[in-house]
Amino acid sequence: MRRGGDGVYEVRARRVGVGLLAQLAAALGAARRAREMRQGDVALIMGTSQSCVSDFERAKANPQLDFVARYAAAVGARLTVAVSDGGSESLIPDPSSEDGQP
C-alpha cells in the first residue's frame, strides 16, 4: 500500500492506534480496580514504577507489547491478540488449537 501525498494513511493509522491503546488501558485498569489492586501493587509485581502504570492507564504512554502483557498478567487478566485481513480468517494461529489453525 502506498501512502498518499497528504499522509492520509499515517494519520489514519495513528488515530486507530491511539483509540486502541485507550481501550486497552481502560480495560486493564478496570481489571486492576475489580481486583482491588492499586497502581503501586501492579508496578511492584511488574518491576516498574507507579508512574509508568499511571501513564499507561491514562494512555499517556505508548508501551511495548511486552509491557502490556506483563500488566495483564499482574492483574490476572488474559491478553489475546487477533489480526485479520478483513475477512473471517485470523492471521495469527490460536495457540490452544492442536494444529495451530484458527
Image: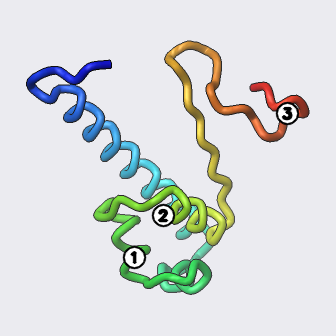
- Mark 3 secondary-structure assignment: loop
Taking the image as shown, residue 29 lies to the left or right of residue 99, namely left
Residue marked by disc 3:
97
On the picture, is 76 further left or further right than 14?
right
Identify the disc placed on residue 24. none
Instruction: Identify the residue shown where x is 14% and y is 29%.
Output: 7
Q: Position of residue 61 (x, y in %)?
A: 32, 64
Q: Earlier in the sequence, mark 2 or mark 3?
A: 2
Question: As displayed, is residue 69 above or below residue 14?
Answer: below
Residue 91: image quadrant is top right
How far across and how far down the image is residue 83, in percent? 56, 31
Does residue 27 sit above or below 67 in this rendering?
A: above
Q: In whole angstroms, how far apart are the C-alphas of marks 2 and 3?
A: 29 Å
Give neighbour class at mark 2: few <14, some 14-19, many 20+ (Cα, 10 Å): many
Residue 17 horizontal/vertical position (percent): 34, 43
Residue under numbered circle 1:
52
Q: Nearer the viewer, residue 88 or 92?
A: 92
Q: Name the residue: 57% across, 62% down.
A: 31
10 Å crowding of disc 1: few (<14), some (14-19), many (20+)? some
Under tag 1, what secondary structure? helix
Amino acid type, residue under disc 1 in the picture: Cys
Q: Is residue 96 above or below residue 102?
A: below
Is the C terminus in the top left, top right, bottom left or bottom right quadrant?
A: top right
Residues at marks 3 and 1, CA–CA distance in whole angstroms: 35 Å
